[in-house]
Amino acid sequence: MWWAKFKTLSPQTFFANSMVRWWIVGLFFTGINIPLLYVFKEWFVFNLFIATFLASEIGTICRFFVNDRWVFGHPRPTWKRLWQYHVAISSSFVIWYSAANYLPRLGIHYLIAAILATCLSVGWSMITNFLWIWRKKQK
């Protein structure tokens, strides 16, 4: 049966899966991004457009380095992969940025809007990350 493969699933094999690691990194950086957005908006009093951009870009760069090494096992980051990563997530960034800045206009608190925006952009980000940047090259 289909569930038989889960009997042999150990913590080592579970965390060795790049998809699991990608989700762990994404959730971790969502946990970083939301407080960072709060700091930019409330402490530094940036307007929402600037605060969301800064929080997102800082998170994106840091997330790239963690994904590149821990999730996909590259010994060193390259400018090419960093550039490809930025291009690949640009469309999911547009989804996130638009929702994070539009939903507050509908009366949703900006931190809740940022979380909802993250939910909207994650699926697309998975597709662009796994099918373009870190796909296995055909030999």
Image: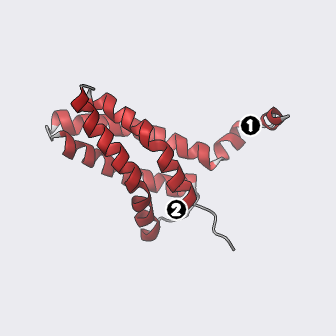
| Quadrant of the frame with the N terminus | top right
* Numbered disc 1: secondary structure: loop
Q: Of tags 1 and 2, which is closer to the observer?
A: 2
Instruction: Point out residue 132 in the picture as x, y percentages from the top left corner.
Output: 53, 61
Position of residue 134 in the picture relative to residue 40 (left or right)? right
Most extreme residue toward the bottom is 139
Is 74 or 50 nearer to us in this picture?
A: 50
Figure quadrant of residue 130: bottom right
Instruction: Point out residue 21 in the picture as x, y percentages from the top left corner.
Output: 57, 45
Instruction: Point out residue 78 in the picture as x, y percentages from the top left corner.
Output: 46, 68
Q: Residue 10, which numbered label?
A: 1
Above/below status of 3 relative to 22? above
Q: Residue 133, which numbered label?
A: 2
Count of numbered circles on the image: 2
What is the basis of the colouring in this image?
A: secondary structure
Measuring 52% from the left and 49% from the top, which residue is drawn there? 126
- Residue type of the residue flagged with mark 1: Ser
Above/below status of 121 relative to 81? above
Q: Residues within 10 Å of mark 2 (few under 14, many from 20)?
A: many
Q: Earlier in the sequence, mark 1 or mark 2?
A: 1
Position of residue 101 in the picture relative to residue 69 (left or right)? left
- Residue type of the residue flagged with mark 2: Ile
Above/below status of 126 relative to 110? below
Most extreme residue toward the front is 106
Figure quadrant of residue 14: top right
Measuring 44% from the left and 55% from the top, which residue is drawn there? 64
